[in-house]
Image: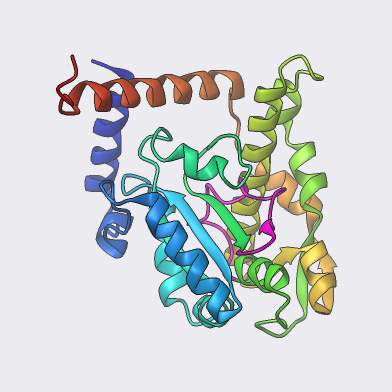
Amino acid sequence: MSSRLILLVLSMLALLAAPACAQDRYGEVYEADADAAALIDAALGQAAAEDKLVLILFGANWCHDSRGLAHRLMTDPVLTPVVEAHYVLTPIDIGIRHRNLDQLQRFGVAAAYGTPTLVIADPQAGLVNAGTVHDWRASDDAGTEDIAAYLAVLAGAPAPFEGPVASVHINAAAEGWASRAEAFTHGDNEALDAYAAGLSRSLTRLAMGREARAGDRAIVSRADAQALGLAVSEDVTSIVLERLNRIRQDIPERRARELEESAEARAEESASSPSDGTD
């Protein structure tokens, strides 16, 4: 049995085991057969006409974070007003991180490290969130205020909620994650280092969301709180890092497994595609 098939079987079992699973809550939002280039072109045109940014979710229906983030952006009472006022939301299917990658690359994003990969672009200036496109692969666990503050800052919008908030120095927490330190190659493998950086920031956002729910408080990036002029009640970077370090990952093994899954998906899709008659 291929590793991709094993992954899909495990995903199905997890969905069956969960009483309120994301599949039931969110439904499918990513169209595998859609013309991704045409969708993005249309979104860019609409954004230009309405003086907005394009918010592209490169995700997949098998991924609960991909569906969950799309659902939250479309329905959450804090997030939806920010999106509707400042963004054109466009979900794009990337399968097992193997499909429509050329549409990521048109914005200067070399690879999809996970799903969803979040691209925010200005119709004229291009990518505006280059350092954080990989922050949201665990977005179904991310805090609502964290997402809202992030989107408001990028759009140059006012704070979408009132403070005070707790803040986190995301770079410090992500760089302090023990699993990332163990995997860091000191430049010997830049691709793996970049993958580890994206994963660590994404899991930092996850830890922030879990801590926010546990403490019933808003927790946002320190930089976003400052940009929005929100009053900060406390710095909880050390608390979030403690929670983050409960998550242990063999990052090189995880990356190798995901690359294998993507290669298998690409090969299977290619083998199942109808011949163009030129053989």
Image x and y of residue 74, in percent: 42, 73
Residue 226 found in image quarter: bottom right
**Does residue 272 sit above or below 15 in this rendering?**
above
Image x and y of residue 246, in percent: 63, 39
- Magenta stretch secondary structure, dominant: loop
**Does residue 144 sit above or below 204 in this rendering?**
below
Image x and y of residue 215, in percent: 64, 67
Q: Which residues are magenta?
A: 123-144
Residue 189 seen in the current view:
yes
Give me the residue at 54% from left, 18% from top: 253
Q: Is residue 20 left or right of residue 169?
A: left
Indicate yes or no whether the magenta region holds residue 27: no
Q: Is residue 236 left or right of residue 92?
A: right
- Depth check: give the residue in front, 83 or 79: 83
- Depth check: give the residue in front, 105 or 188: 105
Residue 246 seen in the current view:
no
Image x and y of residue 92, in percent: 40, 52
Give me the residue at 45% from left, 68% from top: 72
Q: Residue furthest front?
A: 278
Q: How is the image coloured?
A: rainbow
Q: Is residue 194 left or right of residue 101?
A: right
Residue 232 found in image quarter: bottom right
